[in-house]
Image: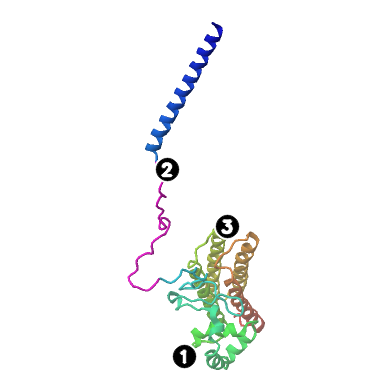
Amino acid sequence: MQPLMKLTFLSLIIFSSNSIINQVQCTRASLEKLIPKSLPPLPISTNIFVIPPSSSPSDTAAAPYNDPPYSFSPSSAPISMQDSDGDPKDLPATFKGLFNPFNLKNNQQGQSSWATSLFENPDVKKTCGSTDNPELCLSSLKQFLGQGNGDKKTDTFSLLEMQVKATLQATELALGLSGKKPAQSDNDKDTVKDCKEMYADAKDNLEKVLKAIKSKDIGTINSMLSATISDFGTCDDGAEESGGTSSLVGYGSKLTKLVSNCLSTVSLIKDTGATT
């Protein structure tokens, strides 16, 4: 019995194996019918990442873009232009009626004729010749002694009064110009505020000088002129110490020269005994 059982068992194994093989072959044949042997290549568009050119009113190709060069556009009303002395020389039309000592270097060609004729006056020659800045002295007197003003008094006190009035006008001009350029930083704002206070005080001092001239009060004239120089210097020195800036800084140099001329005229008055 044992050999017969072995033979039967072996036959069952062979039959099962053939059955499995047949099933696998049938499954493979079914799959081959469903899936093609080779897939066609996918179409690839070559224009997927191409950016079409922008439309233009003209048929010509647009010019390639280039970065523009850096440049500065000058303002219509420059504030900090300076003459050879380092003094601002801009003058807006609204201040043309005031004496402007800040652009004298620009007017030298037309200055010689009237300066020569004005200097021929012995009183003017003596007064301006006693100052450290005779050219500036002549310029400050021009509006008072120019054409049509030949009948003006030219005694030393009268010439002093003219110089003080011119200095007062120039101070008002500087204050007007200072408002043309706003301060940027807080430090600059403080500097501008302090300088405006000093210039306002200088105006008050000059007005007191004019009153003192009427009474020929040499002591008050001298002290107020000295205080005015101090005001202009305080503005410049304060700006330098604080590191701030103000459009008034720079005007003080020429204004100080004007006041210095006035003090020289006061000294001339005292030296010549013209106080009575």
* In this rendering, position of residue 5 left or right of residue 265: left
- Which of pointers 3 and 2 indicates the residue nearer the eye? 2
Q: In terms of image quadrants, where is residue 156? A: bottom right
Magenta stretch holds residue 252: no
Q: Residue furthest top?
A: 1
Q: Quadrant of the C terminus?
A: bottom right
Residue pointed to by mark 1: 147
- Which of pointers 1 and 2 indicates the residue nearer the eye? 2
x 37%, y 64%: residue: 54
- Dot placed on the residue nearer the N-terminal end, 3 or 2: 2
- Residue 158, placed above or below residue 249: below
Q: Quadrant of the N terminus?
A: top right
Q: Which mark is residue 37?
A: 2
Q: Which mark is residue 187?
A: 3
Residue 5: x %, y % from top left:
52, 9
Q: Amino acid at mark 3?
A: Asn
* Contact check, label 3 and label 2, Cβ < 8 Å: no
Question: Which region of the structure is painted magenta?
Answer: 36-61
- Residue 75, placed above or below residue 126: above
